[in-house]
Image: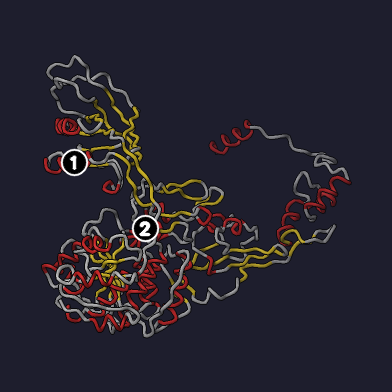
């Protein structure tokens, strides 16, 4: 393949660039020489990474490895791939932060769930390595084993929860076989609601899986009982799931930022609706994420409007650092019309390598960037890519995804709306859903990239996802070809304003108490409702809480909101205490209450002092009641009799007959 060292030097002016023909063989001494100065080292080869790491030994300075062969050089446009190689080398030099781990432990207690002798055969294969129990759902007639090496029972799993090392199953129609069974298994009378706990589940029923997104549930292995090869693979996989295993804690969660609920009223539930494994559950005012069940799709973090849920592999700001390094180097080396191709390692990397080995390879302007899961990509990454000068973003998915990428679809639709509103036309953001390298190549070579922003941004920011997104949007707006102040967004967008029917609003300020971000604000000195649009995440808690139902959400992005002061939605004259003259409420509300009660309520016949107490602040009202010996029943001649349950039932019966 061609190596354009001049392009790499233009993009990396402060680095020493060396090219080789056989660095892992005849020129290996030059690699050893490069190790001597102790500087950070990037090697443009992944095939021989093990050899180079062995040669490097316990070197303190980091070594990064990057594939510039299958991703750049092996291509029909390989001669033009110098800027891309520079971009990939710059990308590899970006440090990868550590991420927290979750430990799962399995002692090998396995439940094999099946319908026929296939489940018993699997039990025989595993009995020497694991603690086996076989559960048969509506079993066919089966001959009893001559020697009982593991328990066999019948039953149907009604509910299943848990993960590797901690499954709990509820079984109906549960029964053990009679030891006296002769030519076929005869079971005892069944019972419902039996509970079973195990470390592993091998599902050979061929029916519906026990878990949503079952491929992502650690410890749950499933195979078609009619496919002997698949059953054998499942048995071998289950056999190895004994011991302690570490998995990433994919999501960091800050409950204080969660906008799920307040006072038992639900607002935001984006993560609950998107989680494919049901790892997220409601827990009062916020949600809870079960790290042991979480499979790392990242859709919750991408959709979370407040940043309460944030991805760790890598964090959102680190992903932006990678995009910045890659696109800055690409443009510095003279590259144009950059298309960022986001892909995962399990599906995307083999597809790209197959295209390079057996097809035309990637186009020279397509920059592949590997992520843990494509569905983790949020709006901030897409917006930042365009702000850094990308002409398009493509997201590579499986033809049949293991879980529905609903959240990613909403993210790309939202990004398209913003880009179109800023004059960045064309299908700039889209998915490529294929398992065929030829289809991938055709989709990439058929692209017609549009014009990128004229002056790519160079910002480098750190912080929570929401803060990073704000900054990326500001930079994109600054460099857009047709910037506008306000863009209308689809429902569910994490930005927007409110419309309040001022005539119906009583300034009860329930919405202020419910708002989790401080977008709605009051003033302790006077009755006023204010709104800061930049802080609003459109969670809907204010709308759901408002007793008068006068609030309406309006999704939009106003690029002036970051610097705009909070605006007043409604303001009224304060009610002044008639005794101490301190403001204590809304004058119109107090007047309305007094007018409704005076002379119309049995406690307020025509007594001025009783009505005057309503026009006092809480402190003065207590003082007045104490001084005057105020009693609600004094001087009341027509006090109604207390109502009982019989009164309500009698009235209800009369209404029904009427």
- Identify which residue, 209 or 470, lies in the foreground: 470
**Residue depth check, mark 1 versus mark 2: number of the one nearer the observer:** 1
Eyeballing the image, is 72 above or below 492? below
Residue at x 26%, y 80% (from the top left corner): 83
Q: CA distance from mark 1 to mark 2?
A: 31 Å
Disc 2 crowd rating (10 Å Cα; few below 14, some 14-19, many 20+) is many
Q: Secondary structure at mark 1?
A: helix
The picture places residue 651, in percent across and down from the top left corner, at: 60, 36
The picture places residue 256, in percent across and down from the top left corner, at: 53, 54
Q: Which residue is mark 2?
A: 299
Q: Which residue is mark 1?
A: 236
Whether residue 5 is visible, yes or no, is yes
The reply, left or right, for residue 602 in relation to residue 219 is: right
- Identify which residue, 40 or 388, lies in the foreground: 40
The reply, left or right, for residue 362 in relation to residue 9 is: left
The picture places residue 2, in percent across and down from the top left corner, at: 16, 79
Where is the N terminus found, in terms of image quarters? bottom left
- Identify which residue, 220 or 427, lies in the foreground: 220
Eyeballing the image, is 34 above or below 464? below
Disc 1 crowd rating (10 Å Cα; few below 14, some 14-19, many 20+) is some
Quadrant location of residue 54? bottom left
């Amino acid at each position: 393949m061609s190596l354009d060292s001049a392009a790499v030097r233009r993009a990396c002016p402060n680095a020493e660039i060396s090219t080789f023909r056989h660095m892992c063989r005849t020129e290996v001494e030059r690699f050893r020489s490069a190790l001597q100065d102790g500087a950070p080292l990037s090697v443009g080869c992944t095939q021989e990474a093990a050899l180079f790491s062995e040669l490097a030994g316990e070197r303190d300075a980091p070594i990064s490895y990057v594939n510039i062969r299958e991703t750049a050089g092996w291509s029909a446009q390989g001669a033009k791939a110098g800027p891309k190689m520079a971009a990939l080398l710059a990308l590899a030099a970006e440090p990868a932060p550590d991420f927290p781990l979750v430990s799962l432990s399995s002692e090998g207690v396995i439940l094999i769930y099946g319908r026929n002798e296939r489940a018993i055969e699997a039990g025989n294969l595993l009995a020497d390595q694991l603690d086996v129990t076989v559960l048969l759902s509506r079993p066919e007639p089966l001959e009893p084993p001559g020697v009982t090496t593991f328990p066999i029972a019948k039953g149907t799993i009604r509910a299943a929860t848990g993960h590797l090392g901690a499954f709990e199953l509820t079984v109906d129609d549960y029964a053990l076989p009679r030891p006296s069974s002769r030519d076929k298994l005869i079971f005892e009378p069944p019972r419902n609601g039996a509970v079973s706990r195990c470390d592993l589940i091998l599902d050979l029923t061929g029916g519906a899986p026990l878990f949503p997104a079952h491929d992502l549930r650690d410890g749950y292995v499933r195979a078609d009982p009619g496919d002997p090869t698949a059953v054998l693979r499942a048995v071998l996989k289950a056999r190895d799931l004994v011991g302690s295993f570490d998995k990433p804690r994919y999501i960091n969660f800050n409950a204080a930022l969660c906008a799920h609920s307040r006072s038992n009223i639900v607002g935001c539930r984006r993560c609950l609706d998107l989680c494919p494994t049901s790892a997220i559950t409601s827990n009062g005012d916020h949600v809870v994420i079960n790290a042991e069940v979480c499979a790392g799709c990242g859709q919750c973090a991408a959709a979370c409007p407040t940043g309460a849920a944030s991805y760790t592999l890598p964090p959102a700001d680190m992903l932006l650092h990678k995009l910045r390094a890659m696109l800055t180097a690409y443009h510095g080396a003279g590259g144009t019309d950059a298309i960022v191709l986001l892909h995962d390692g399990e599906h995307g990397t083999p597809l790209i390598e197959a295209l390079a080995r057996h097809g035309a390879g990637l186009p020279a302007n397509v920059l592949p960037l590997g992520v843990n899961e494509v569905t983790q990509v949020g709006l901030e990454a897409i917006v930042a890519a365009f702000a850094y000068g990308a002409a398009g973003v493509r997201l590579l998915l499986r033809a049949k995804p293991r879980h529905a990428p609903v959240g990613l679809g909403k993210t790309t639709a939202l990004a398209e709306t913003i880009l179109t509103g800023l004059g960045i036309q064309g299908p700039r953001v889209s998915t490529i859903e294929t398992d065929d390298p030829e289809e991938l190549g055709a989709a990439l070579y058929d692209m017609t990239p549009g014009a990128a922003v004229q002056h790519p941004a160079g910002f480098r920011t750190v912080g929570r996802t929401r803060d990073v997104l704000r900054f990326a949007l500001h930079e994109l707006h600054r460099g857009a070809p047709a910037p506008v102040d306000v863009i209308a967004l689809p429902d569910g967008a994490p930005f927007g304003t409110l419309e309040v029917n001022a005539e119906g609003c009583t300034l009860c300020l329930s919405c202020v108490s419910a708002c989790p971000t401080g977008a709605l604000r009051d003033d302790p000195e006077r009755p006023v409702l204010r709104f800061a649009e930049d802080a609003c995440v459109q969670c809907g808690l204010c709308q759901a809480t408002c007793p008068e139902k006068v609030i309406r959400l309006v999704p939009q992005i106003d690029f002036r909101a970051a610097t705009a002061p909070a605006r007043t939605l409604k303001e009224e004259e304060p009610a002044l205490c008639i005794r101490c003259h301190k403001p204590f409420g809304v004058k119109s509300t107090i007047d309305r209450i007094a007018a409704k009660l005076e002379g119309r309520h049995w406690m307020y016949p025509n007594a001025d002092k009783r009505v005057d107490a309503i026009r006092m602040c809480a402190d003065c009202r207590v003082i007045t009641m104490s001084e005057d010996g105020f009693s609600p029943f004094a001087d009341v001649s027509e006090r109604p009799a207390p109502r009982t349950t019989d009164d309500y039932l009698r009235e209800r019966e009369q209404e029904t007959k009427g």
